Amino acid sequence: MVSNDEKRAKEALKKQAKFGEDIDLEEYDEGSRDLSELESLEDLPGDTKSTMLDSGIVPSEKGKSGNFLLMDNTVVHSAVMGSGVEVMPLSQALKVHDWLRDYMWKGVQPDSDKYTAETYLQKADGYFIRALPGAKVRMPVQTCLLLKNRNTKQYVHNVLIAEEGSEFEVVTGCATSKGVEKGLHLGISEFFLKKDSKLTFTMVHNWSEFVGVRPRSSIVMEEGSTYINNYVALKPVKTIQTYPTAYLNGPNAVCRFNSVAVAHPGSMMDMGSRAVLNAPGCKAELISRTITTGGTVIARGQLVGNSPGIKAHLECKGLILSEKGVQIAIPELEAHIPDVEMTHEAAVGKIAQDQVEYLMSRGLSEDEAVGMIVRGFLDVGIRGIPDHLKAEIDKILQETDVRGS
Amino acid sequence: MLEIENLTVEVGGREILHDLSLNVMTGYTTVLFGPNGSGKSTLLMTIMGFSGYKVKSGRIILNGEDITHMPVNERAKRGIGMMMQRPPNLTGVRLKDLVRVFCKGNVDTEKVAEDLDMTRFLERDVNVGFSGGEIKRSEILQLTAQNPCMILLDEPESGVDMVSIEKLGSKVHDLLQGPSHCAGWREKSGKAALIITHTGQILDYVEADRGYVMCNGTVACSGNPRELLQEIRKMGYNECIRCKINRANIIKENI
């Protein structure tokens, strides 16, 4: 019997996404589903390890509660080291937990666009991470989604569940193996935060100038839950369009999105975050810091206020470091009742000359001064990042070429 | 050390400094007085080389080298350091990171920060949310780390509370004169300063050697700084202007 979802997905196979240039899915090959399994991340070849490190993933079990690695469309590694948390392929979790089907495709609709439809119909695998009720998971779970082979179309479907009163942290690094000259990543991520739970989720993108990326994420939040999202995209990418949405459905839920991105020459980045505040006392803060060194970056943000006593702030700031670069900031506030406090702040422009000269008056060269200001500008966007990731991100930041072309 | 020769400067298309000349000798602390809008800050900003301060004519000579059109950082490298009146906010740049980048030699910046009661500011973004007095302390901390030989201070005491002025004054003193009060040492130290002051309060902490009074974008008078300050307090700046005109007339008559 064909389910209703399946029917809708089939009908949506040609449906273009609301944002982002249309990608022809026919151009790509199905990613391999039969790569060989891996005992430990430490067994990976050196260049793969360094690619992972560049996306915030440490190829080691030390200090982690769980590790997960998806290559193309094969889960090659999944391991739990800590207690209070489950980490496994979604396909396996569906066999273990018969209730899981009730969560699948509840956050993201299969017929949202052609990318969700295809991912649905392909029955994509991905990670399932669940913090058990009341568990305070001390060490982070890290997951890596890696494009391994050329011309691959990677489908991913992730489900994260924070049970009541649990606390945990997940780091996801998305990367492309060296030499992969064409690829596409389609990723569905559905987050469910139960009452009084807390999840800190950090995603580091390290795709390449040949890769198209279309993540689709939603976060469904119950009473008193807290969701912190850090998104770091400092490396080149061909095209990315993402607009994760948090639904704050229970009273006093709190979410914060911090995003930093650099649009290199040739990169087309359309990224945003959205919070729908549906219950009294909810709070949301969406902060983005974007830079163009020659590419195009669209920083979207939307706050929707549906309940009294909510408070929300949206901030998109962009620096233009190249004549060829384009910055578009689109902040939206949407209130359906009077008793809301919603604000936004958007600014795009070049680096202030007085700041550069102030640093130069201390003896820094112009390039050093610009570098320092730019890193400071981005730093504001990643201050919420967990300490163990700071050093890696700082390193990526130091290596990022922020000179305008 | 620093010679300003017939300097004419435009800001935003308006001439602010007219044919101004003065010099600061090595080892000397020189004070600039003058009413608001007389061009004192413009002079310091021009010496530091900030854009927007366009030299139309004249020269700035530092230790015999013409630096009139040199980039800001080259001037800093040659030993000029400035405390700005209103420095820009550097969002995302922590004070301690900034100081670490340009700190030269043996300066224990943490100790200096402690002396200035600035330790808790080291983790903060430079100038963001700082009060007027905190900006001054942050600037003097930076200057101490930078350790320049030609020091430009734009109203170091303004906005500083009674308690902090002691700490700030002592750091300004250390910066200018080292640990010694000896005039001989000062001359050998190779340092010199040009300080803008309205109240003269800073003179309680530094040994000022010479004073200039600026009016309408040029030097109206020069002499012993304490005597000048007394006169200004008593008679106001109008008297300086009148005096200058009188002197000019006398010279003309004699010709």
Image: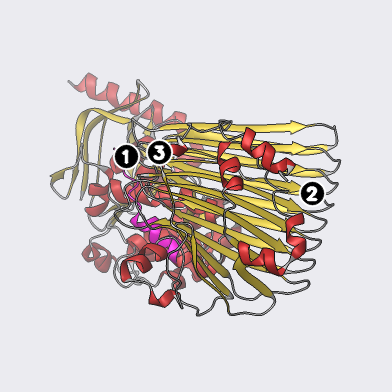
Q: Quadrant of the C terminus of chain B?
A: top left
In the image, the segment drawn in magenta is A392-405
Q: Earlier in the sequence, mark 3 or mark 2?
A: 3
Task: Say whether residue B175 is visible.
Answer: no
**Residue placed under numbered mark 2 in the picture:** A282
- The image's mark for residue A404 is 1
Left or right side of A96 for A176:
left
Type of amino acid under label 3:
Glu
The stretch drawn in magenta includes residue A394: yes
Q: Chain of mark 2?
A: A
Q: Position of residue A325 (x, y in %)?
A: 38, 33
Q: Nearer the viewer, residue B18 or A185?
A: A185
* Tag shown at residue A305: none
- The crowding category of the residue bearing disc 2, from other C-alpha atoms within 10 Å (few below 14, some 14 to 19, many at least 20), is many
Instruction: State whether discs 1 and 2 lie on one chain.
Output: yes
- At 66% across and 72% down in the image, what residue appears? A86
Relative image position of residue A206 (x, y in whole percent): 42, 54
Circles 1 and 3: CB atoms closer than 8 Å: no
Classify residue B63 as left or right of residue B36. left
Q: Give SS at disc 1.
A: loop
Q: Nearer the viewer, residue B220 or A331?
A: A331
Q: Chain of mark 1?
A: A
The colour scheme used here is secondary structure
The mark that comes first in sequence, 1 or 3, is 3
User: Which residue is under mark 3?
Assistant: A27
Residue A385 appears in the rendering: yes
Q: In the image shown, does A105 or B181 lie closer to the viewer?
A: A105
